[in-house]
Amino acid sequence: MHWANIRGERGTGGGLGVTDGVRHIISILLQNEAGALARVANLFSTRGYNIESLNVAPTHDPTVSRLTLVTVGSETVMDQIIKQLGKLVDVVNIIDMTDDDHIERELALFKIQVEGNDREIVTRAASEFGATVLDDHESHFTVELTGDSGAIDRFVTAISARARMSTVVRSGAMAVARGAPILTPT
């Protein structure tokens, strides 16, 4: 089978659900202090909203972290969430990246069990998907793939149909606006 059938590249901005308002990528600048992340997560938890993925790390300013989360909800729900997040003392700035032209990426590491012919299949799939084989130990490959969430999902589907995937580690979505920054400390 040719891997391009499964790759099905999609646009680099917006991802799934942009037009129907289902999937949202929210970027938050927040003070890099103990408890800040817990307060954001608690807001979602107490209102019964799910966080599909969460990524947080310090910015170039060590007092500010950038948190990117993916959640699902209607425009009304997203407006309510953003207003509530904006009231948190730790939040410096917030934006729903979904409707803006942006670049979305996720990093994934895979541990794939290989036997005999699986080695060639995994190597070929990694090449077709733009992944890198980091370690090719005799019975397991460690593979790294960076792409949008859909590309990573397609890689999982493609490999799982042909080899045993024993570990999947995903960073969660990260997003940045194209061109000039739209999320800056105010």
Image (spheres, rainbow, N blue to C red):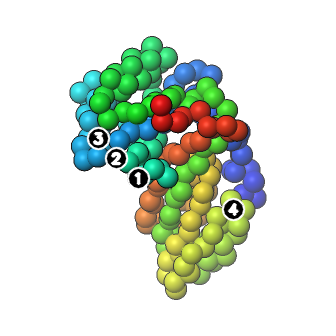
Q: Is residue 5 visible?
A: yes
Compared with residue 87, is residue 150 higher up or lower down, i.e. above or below?
A: below
Closer to the observer: label 4 or label 3? 3
Closer to the observer: label 3 or label 1? 1
Q: Nearer the viewer, residue 164 or 102?
A: 102
Asked if the residue at tag 2 contacts the one at tag 1, i.e. Cβ–Cβ closer than 8 Å, the answer is yes
Closer to the observer: label 3 or label 2? 2
Say which element carries label 2: loop
Asked if the residue at tag 1 contacts the one at tag 3, i.e. Cβ–Cβ closer than 8 Å, the answer is no
Circle 3 sits on which residue? 36
Circle 1 sits on which residue? 62
Closer to the observer: label 4 or label 1? 1
Question: Residue 32: which disc?
Answer: 2
Q: Nearer the viewer, residue 167 or 172?
A: 172
Which one is earlier in the sequence, the residue at label 2 or at label 4?
2
Q: Quadrant of residue 133?
A: bottom right
Name which residue type carries label 2.
Asn
Q: Nearer the viewer, residue 168 or 28?
A: 28
Spatial separation of the CA atoms under disc 2 and disc 4: 34 Å
Spatial separation of the CA atoms under disc 4 and disc 1: 33 Å
Q: Residues within 10 Å of mark 1 (few under 14, many from 20)?
A: few
Name which residue type carries label 4.
Gly
Question: Residue 130: which disc?
Answer: 4
Closer to the observer: label 2 or label 4? 2
